Amino acid sequence: MKNEVGQLILRVVFGLIFFVHGLDKFQGGIANTAVFFDSLSIPGFLAYIVAIIELIGGLAMILGIGTRVIAILFAIIMLGAIFIAKFPAGLLGNGEMAGYELDLVLLATSIYFILADRIALSLDNKFSNSKQK
């Protein structure tokens, strides 16, 4: 049971981080994020997709809905953030730009949730149990 409580805490905090980042993209002006994406040679429309995945995916992760699928999407986002946006700044950053240390932790957490078993403390588990009955 301790492992399940630990995983629940990790999942909720992980989801909250993505939810807040998605919300921030919309509140800060999603068009600004699109311009930033364009400056990195990433199509600006992907900013909208990333923000929606972060916002809705973060909420789903908090609730434990579609955890594995959401974790895969988050891993893809983190790989992009690390290798396209932040890798040149280094792990800890360079004074002008933040490093990719947080992104690396979020990537590792994504991989954990891709590989982890379902726990009783998630809506995924509740839905799968009701389908089996």
Image: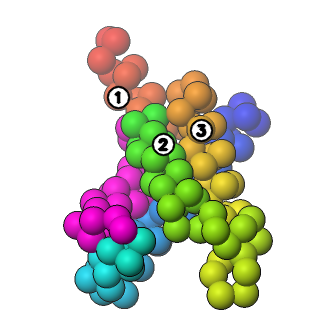
Dot 2, crowdedness within 10 Å: few (<14), some or many (≥20)? many
> Is 89 above or below relative to 67?
below
Magenta-colored segment: predominant secondary structure: helix
Residue 111 is labelled as 3
Indicate which label's residue lies in the foreground, 1 or 3. Answer: 3
- Give the residue number, with chain letter if any, for mark 1: 127
Mark positioned earlier in the residue sequence (1 or 3): 3
Q: CA distance from mark 2 to mark 3?
A: 7 Å
Mark positioned earlier in the residue sequence (1 or 2): 2
Q: What residue is shown at x 31% (from left), y 68% (from top)?
A: 47
Indicate which label's residue lies in the foreground, 1 or 2. Answer: 2
Residue 71 is labelled as 2
Task: Residue type at mark 2: give it.
Answer: Ala
Q: CA distance from mark 1 to mark 2?
A: 18 Å
Residue 60 painted magenta: yes
- Quarter of the image where one finds residue 46: bottom left
Task: Residue type at mark 1: give it.
Answer: Phe
> Is 100 above or below relative to 114?
below
Left or right for 78, reference 91: left
Dot 3, crowdedness within 10 Å: few (<14), some or many (≥20)? some
Q: What residue is shown at x 45% (from left), y 40% (from top)?
A: 72
Residue 27 is labelled as none
Q: Bounds of the magenta span?
A: 41-67
Task: Residue type at mark 3: give it.
Answer: Ile
